[in-house]
Image (cartoon, rainbow, N blue to C red):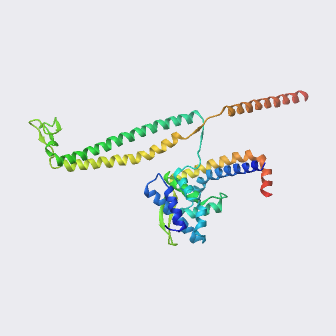
Amino acid sequence: MPGEVKQRGEDDEKWEAQLRKGCLEMAVLAALAPARSYGLEIIRTLEKHSNLDLSEGTVYPILNRLRSDGLVTSSWVESESGHPRKYYSLTSKGYDRATRMAEVWLQFTAGVNALIEPLLPAAQERARG
Amino acid sequence: MTNDPLELYIARFQMSLTGMTLDIRQDIVDEIRAHVHERMCVSGMPIPEILERLGPPEDLAREYCTGSLVTWHDRFSPLVVLRRAGAWVVTTAHAGAIAIIAIYGYGIALGFFVFALLRSLVPELTVVWVTADFDNIGIGPNAPFDARPLAENWLQPMAVGLGIAFLMLATMALRRLVPSLKRWCRYAMKPIEFPSLDGAGRKAANLSHDFFQAQARMAQRVRTRWQNG
């Protein structure tokens, strides 16, 4: 029985990790939409505005991949703190992609929300307790 | 051997970053180093804790190397299959173009360089000649009686110049084509999620359930109307 509970916990964690990782790319693009930003600032924006609870090491490879896909550009800029910062900004392709992602996200969550509606009372009770 | 935790972390991280150019690797390492310094300045967090938050260096490097975090599947549809087939055709055409440009472009460039070298070693064997009425052109000592040498002194610099031009043009064309090939190839290789028999069975069961429900509702409506006269 404890083994079964442990397995269920691991499965939940795996699913949650995949879910978080899946929407992280969109979240990073969205964080860059208002203005250019550097790695740590992006991480803090994501921590502040979303519930993503991410490992800091995850964001940099994503930024690197977005750059190689031409969705963001980067440049090193000297900062007041004395350390150079690598600033990222969205390209027009990246902005289009982020907008499309947001559109898909809205449709997707609307569909899933309708589907999980019968589970909501139990889920809310669990969150409260 | 250093005991600095940051340097030890960076060394392990650098060792695990494979399959990329030195410039890209250095850029990535510089960014991670900048992140650690920035985090330390902003939050005063000790370096070991910052490194712990970044995760093990091998895992971090693996994230960079593997690139994609989640594999997305496309649902099966005839249009998706048609698109994939189209992507394979374009990928094959790209690969063919790359092979032709690489073989011919670099081959011709090499030919010009070899010619320029031979021109200094054996000038009498590498004379380019043209006949008086310009209907015949060739290389070598066995020229026709009315032939005259062509651009004798300029031949070597011209060959070097043309070699460089072919080398540059082939490289520029390949630099454009290779990323495009990668993109097409990635799209063509994207997995398709084919419908399973279980899924089809479930859909059929749902459809028949909906049909019988609708039939029962209609019968109920007819019965109510008949009872109400």
Where is residue B33 shown, x and y percent of the image? 51, 65
Q: Classify the position of the C terminus of chain B by image quarter.
A: top right
Asked whether A87 or B171 is in front, the reply is B171
| Image-based side of B169 in relation to B194, left or right | left
Residue B229 in view: no
| Image-based side of A124 in relation to A111, left or right | right
Say which residue appears at 48% left-offset and 42% top-offset: B184
| Image-based side of B50 in relation to B121, left or right | right
Say how many tags the image has.
0
Residue with the most extreme left position: B145
Residue B171 in view: yes
Asked whether A16 or B55 is in front, the reply is B55
| Image-based side of B187 in relation to A13, left or right | left
Where is residue A14 shown, x and y percent of the image? 67, 50
Say which residue appears at 50% left-offset and 72% top-offset: A82
Where is residue B74 shown, x and y percent of the image? 59, 40
Asked whether B215 or B143 is in front, the reply is B143
Where is residue B8 shown, x and y percent of the image? 52, 64
Say which residue appears at 49% left-offset and 41% top-offset: B185
Q: Is residue B103 above or below residue A68?
A: above
Say which residue appears at 61% left-offset and 54% top-offset: A24
